[in-house]
Amino acid sequence: MTTQKGSIQVNTENIFPIIKKFLYSDHEIFLRELISNATDATTKIKHFSSIGEFKGELGDLRIEVKIDSKKKTLSITDHGVGMSAEEIDKYINQIAFSGAEEFVEKYKTAGESGMIGHFGLGFYSAFMVAKKVEINTLSFREDAKAAKWTCDGSTEFSIGSSKKTDRGTEIILHIDDDNQEFLEDSRIKGLLDKYCRFLPIPIQFGTETEYVDDTEKKKEDGSFEKKSIQVDAIINDVPPLWKKGPTELKDEDYIAFYQTLYPMSEAPLFWIHLNVDYPFNLTGVLYFPKVKNELELQRNKIQLYSNQVFVTDDVKDIVPEFLMLLHGVIDSPDIPLNVSRSFLQSDSRVKKITSHITKKVADKLDELFRADREAYQQKWESIGMFVKYGAVSDEKFAEKALKFALLKNTAGEFFTAEEYRKKVEDSQTNKDKKVVLLYTNNRKTQAPFIESAKKRGYDVLDMDGPLDSHFIGFLEHKESDMTIVRVDADAIDKLIDKGEKRESVLSDAQVEALKTTFTDQVQKPDWEIQTEALSPDDHFITVIKPEWERRMREMQGGAGMFGALPERVVVMVNTNHPLATKIVGVEEDAAKKDFVEQSFDLALLSQNMLDGDALERFIRRTENMMK
């Protein structure tokens, strides 16, 4: 068989169904693409003017979007470079060719960067909503002739002369029957606000009412009555703050821009201005919003732009998971407009951007902590959500988080983990074991245990946040000589061993009899009765749920591997408590039974584990004992 060589040909009859169905996931993207191309053409004419290649007047460079409901058309008109018939054939008919790429290559030494649109497939997105598309255009070049291109979505097109007399390009879309929504003012206004509000070229759509002085109607106080006039409505009248340098901006500028992005929101706590040009291009502003100590925050509040063109607000593959709670804007020309999840997940530049954002946030938090610790502590209720989330979910952030992650005790005092460990060590004389940190996640229900700890001179952390179960695990992982347990997880003298060996005031036989009495009372196979010679100041009966198992249940919301398993409980009987001696001395079985039941129910009540019939019996028994 002889070797055959040739060129692979693309069957253009199949290109339009592919464009309409698969090129873009959402048909509304067509408007972004066409506005981007118009912006690109306008940016080019400004550049040609700056280098002397175009010597005429630039004139009004705004891009105008119009709807003609009678003709069922939507038009986008710019006053950019325009095209000749030959350029239409090259840039529009040859779908695979990118005019913007050629332009950048030709003029890359002239210092111009940031071309937005690409001809070719971007333009053809118009056919997702239009049954016919027209182009009327006039090139900026001398002696250029206006040209008109028409295509009905088939492989047939026509190029002829046009009556257009002013420089630039007008694209007219004849909207098809399935996409009549794009002939509604509100729909187009919404899309322009979404995709184009920060473009560098003014975008005009319709008119708006403006009130001015009526100089013919003067009031007695010398002022004038107001009259209404219709003026052109400019979509992008707010400049993109992130394009300016931090030294050009004041706090009120950042806050005003935040209110533009998120109307009716409280002012943010602080912000981070991103400005990187190597090894990737990235600008933006990230805001830390005020939050409550609960996970009620909306995600998708960070907007991603590519050269000021909105791309998406689903940035989970660019911004680290724990920073999805932030608000703001990220702009990078290194991320293409037609971005896909597979691209974001595999692209090395995106990974560098993610890493850089993590570093910038960590550095900013560290800076705020060191610069004004008191102000930082006042903001901790909101900041803590991000710091704890980052510490438990992002390894690189966790490396720095211990410097500025704070712990708060029940007295409202703040400590870093290192500071708090030193404080706790001073109250724990037995240095042979791990340092024990006591915490509460419910100050009301655990109040007796907190008070008992304080009487012994121990401090208790307030850890009632939704992420604190995870954060406790993080601290124990980072601080291997530290163990953290809930204040009601065990008797304090057992948790914090000072090296003192206590002897029970009861004999071995009395201890065994007491254990048997409680075993008969509890009668639950998954509950274990233990006796311990503790301080007389400790509770008589303590119902304990193993710390590790309880913490895992809390983190999993009661589901997961523990959901179907019985919950293990330990009933700790303090044999040195005065009530232990009293029960042992009761000879009447009925009286001893009431005493044991009452003591046990009190312990259950302290853990919110007494309800239903058992609670009713406890109340009746208490009333009888009081009588």
Image (tube, grey):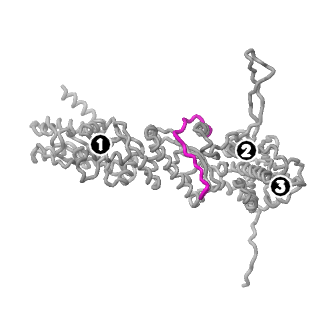
Q: What residue is rendered at 75% in x and 69% in y?
A: 9
Residue range in magenta is 259-280
Give the amino acid type for the residue marked by disc 2 in the picture: Phe
Which residue is tagged 1?
487
Give the amino acid type for the residue marked by disc 1 in the picture: Val
- Relative horizontal placement of residue 51, taking residue 619 as reference (left or right): right
Given residues 70 and 564, the one toward you in this image is 70
Residue 186 sits above or below residue 111 on the image: above
Callout 3: few (<14), some (14-19), or many (20+) C-alpha neighbours within 10 Å? Answer: many
Distance in Å between CA atoms under marks 3 and 1: 76 Å
Q: What residue is rendered at 80% in x and 51% in y?
A: 49
Query: Secondary structure beneath disc 2?
Result: helix
Which residue is tagged 2?
182
Give residue 83's mark.
Answer: 3
Query: Secondary structure beneath disc 1?
Result: loop
Mark 1, mark 2: which one is toward the viewer?
A: 1
Give the amino acid type for the residue marked by disc 3 in the picture: Met
Q: Find out whether residue 266 is within the magenta segment.
A: yes
Callout 1: few (<14), some (14-19), or many (20+) C-alpha neighbours within 10 Å? Answer: many
Given residues 69 and 277, the one toward you in this image is 277
